[in-house]
Every structure is written in C-alpha cells, then in structure tokens.
Image (cartoon, grey):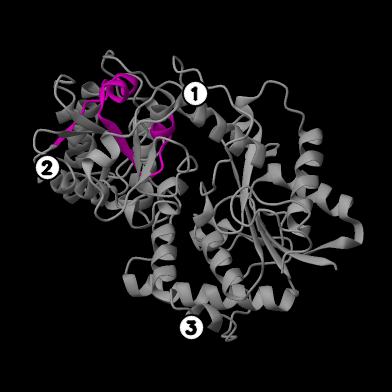
Amino acid sequence: MTIRLFCVATSKSNSPIIAQMLAQAGDRLEMALHLGGTDAQFKGTSLSRMNRRRGSIGHLMDRDRYRGAAQALFQHPGYLQEMEEFIAHLERRSENNDLRPHRIHAMQEYADYFHILADAMAAQIRDSGATHALFFNIPHLAYDTIAYQVARAMGLPTLVLTQSLFPAQFFSMRDPADLGAFVPRPDAATYPIDTQSQPGLFYMKGVKQEPSPRGRLSARAVLNLVAFLITRRPHMALNPFYLRRVLSRMQAIYGGLPDWRDPFAGFFHDSQLDYFDHLVEQESEAVDLSTPYVYMPLQLQPEMTTASLGGIYADQALAVERLADMLPDGVRILVKENPKQGAYMRGPMFFHRLKRIPQVQFLPSYANTHALTANARFVATITGTVGWEAVRIGKPALTFGQAWYRSFPGVVEYRDGLRYDDVAGLTWDHAALERAAGDLLSRSHGGIIDRHYRAMVDDHDPQENAALVAGTVLELLEGRAAPTFGDRGVVGPVT
C-alpha cells in the first residue's frame, strides 16, 4: 500500500525530515499535499493572517468557489465545538494581538471564514487523493486546526507529533485528546527523579524569582509604539497630548516592574496599557506562605498548552472559579501571572472575575514559584509544567486539561464532584513516579521535531536527526510502531 500523505509542517527544520521520509520510503510514500512554509504547496500562515503569500503552487484560496467538500465536518455532532475552537485559534491573530493581523472583527465573519476555509481545505485534500494526515505539532494556529478537523471528518488516519520536555524525545498520538493518557506498567524501567532539583526550562531563561531593580523604557518598546501608531493610529501619531500620555504610562509601567520584564518589547497595542497597569499594582503585595493555600500559576496565552489542550479551561478564570468551589474555608488560592504574558485574554473583566473570588490573592512577579510549590497544599494548573515540578517533590497536582504527565502518580484530573481532600490528601510512592516517567520515556521517540528544543541538547546533528525522526515517523504511519498515546500494539497499516 502506498501512503499518500497530507502533511502539515510549517517549520523549515521539518523540511529535511520530510525529505528523508520520502527518500527512505521509496514508492511506499508519496506527498499528496503539503501545507507549510513557502517551500510547501500552500503557505499555512497566509490562511491565519489572511494575506496573499503563496506556496510553491499558489494560494489555497486561488479560484475559490464553493465545492461542497466539507459536509462531513459540518454534519458532525461536534460541529459547533469545532467552529468555536477554530475561531479561538484564529482570534490570536486579531489586531489587538498581532502586528500583522487579519481583518476579521465580528463573530459572524469568523463563522463565515470557518465555512469558506473548511470547504476549500476539504476540496484540496479530496482532490489530492490523500490517504493519511501528519501534523508536526498539535494543531493550534487556526490553519492547522481546520486542516486537522477536516482530515478527521473525512476519515483520514491522523498522526500528531509534539516535542517533549525529555531532551531529544517527542511524543506521538492519533488524537490530541489522547496526550498524557496511558496506563503505567508496574515493571517499567525507572527514570531517576531527583527530589532536590527541578527540570531546566530553556524558555524561562532570564526570568527571576526574587525582588529586582525596576526597569526602564526600552528602545524596542518605543519602536513598537511607532509601528503601532503608523499601522493602527496614524491620525494620533502627530497628536502631542496623546503621545505624551502614552509615553508617560509606558514609563510608569517599566518603572513599576522588574528590569528583566520588557512589556512592550515584542508588541505594542494601547489595550495592553490597562493590563500592565494592573500588574504594577500587584508588585507591592506581600507574599504570605504561612496559612493554607493552593498555588495556581497562570499559563502563557495564546499557546497550544491551553488553546488546544485546555478545553473549556482555556478560560483560566473558569478553572480558578471551579477550584474555589471545592476549597474549604480558610484555604486561599495564590495566583501568579506568567512572566511572559501580555494582554491577550487578560482584559479588565478577567481580573474582575478573580477579584470576585474571596479566596484569591494575585501575587507579585517576584514571588518564588519553587517556594510557592513547596509550601502549597497542592498546585493547580491547566496543563502547565508546574504540575510536573510539583509531583517531583511530593506535592499533588490538579490538572484541568490534557497535561502530558496527567497519568503519573500524584496527579488528579479535575472532575465534577471532586473534593479538596481528594487532592490535598493524596500520597504516592516516589519509586512509582519514577517507573511511570520511565514507562512514558520508553513510549516516546528519539529526535527533535521542534527547533526551539535544540537548546536542550549539546550535540545536535541536523542530518542525523532528520534520518532518525523520518524512520520513526514512517514506522508510525505504516503501523509498524505504536504511538506514545492511544492505540498501543497496532500491527499493520492504520486505516
């Protein structure tokens, strides 16, 4: 059987892997359709940004017309949920959050685009003759979201990959909902876990956990302000009163936050001013660890870890509300903002919701997350690494989404009727945790599919990596190997 592959891979670092797959497979594999960068047939990000950047054979919306190809998706029982997920993922590219945004504003326009894009995508998949679909990351960027939804609705076997926090190891699954779901084997080889150390997180480099000197307005922030004025507020660019007011607020924000925090270095929008004003107000808060509390650090948004893996708890305030409902009197919820968060999904109403909860205290940026974890009754998170950090030192973790570690001892998945003591009273054998981690590591695959994770290894060889990953992915596609999560023990082609 020849697999005709529909592949979604945007990163240039995936191109050598794809080339190796085709070379290794010979006539067992053909590329039917590739959605990715400019070297792919169609450029994926052009669909999320809604621009005209083309792939090797053009733009997906060239000669667009209704084809009636996505009826399987539109008639699916979960159709409305699928559309809501797509809209949430596309909204991250709105003008409030992106310097190069799409121009959609109204909810009906989002719904219209969902239908148009689904039909166009389904027609391309159908016409390509694709038999299988491969995703090099869990869909969360709108263009890959709709690609996954359509492929599944059309009955294509799907394979989804994602990098893990184990160095040079990645996970695989048929459905992102399976992430983290497995039954640890009691006889699995152990993965040593030092209770006195925490995993190094390269993406948190530069973030400090103690009081720091105050910051100063950066040149990059001023440049981003200029870009904002030119593209969004040209009529205000020459208004000295507006400019003075905005610069004054920006200087006050920098002066109220630690010097490692550069709020407007990546992007400026005037909606962010209220958000950072709020953070400055929290910097003078005292941190009291002497009375009982649950620690809940907020996760960075927009990110896959909440947008795709959080379900309804991508609304993190909802998770805080559910947590408050299960706590006894006298137990607080200490909430800490992600140190890289911007104003996305953090409007005034978000903070008002938190303030309405008597148990909640919002923490300053200098609060030490390791001390907060160590002294908590338990930690709560959607899918955050803090849960993995907690169980390593014997603290229970409550998760609201599909965390990769959710099947480990010490982790409780939120459910209706869950009680405080079900989590706070949890105990487990550290050796069992090491066996579960070792079991998961044995189910993962060697190699790097996300270039950002090269920082975790010292001797990365791109050519060796491409050959290694390509061989593994071929085995997974052909059913000669089982995915990390999901259908273990599959033999023969997956159909």
Q: Position of residue 399 (x, y in %)?
A: 36, 44
Q: CA distance from mark 2 to mark 1?
A: 33 Å
Q: Is residue 372 magenta?
A: yes
Indicate whether 128 appears above or below 3. below
Q: Position of residue 42 (x, y in %)?
A: 66, 63
For image coordinates 59% across by 26% down, the residue present is 191
For image coordinates 70% across by 36% down, the residue present is 447
Q: Identify the secondary structure beneath mark 3.
A: loop
Span of residues in magenta: 360-388
- Comes first in the chain, label 3 or label 1: 3
Residue 199: image tag: 1
Quarter of the image where the N terminus is located: bottom right
Q: Callout 3, which amino acid? A: Gln
Q: Is residue 186 magenta?
A: no
For residue 403, which quarter of the picture? top left
For image coordinates 15% across by 20% down, the residue present is 288
- Comes first in the chain, label 2 or label 3: 3
Q: CA distance from mark 3 to mark 1?
A: 45 Å
For image coordinates 46% across by 16% down, the residue present is 197
Q: Are marks 2 and 3 in contact (CB under 8 Å)?
A: no
Q: Callout 2, which amino acid? A: Lys
Q: According to the image, label 3 marks what residue?
A: 75
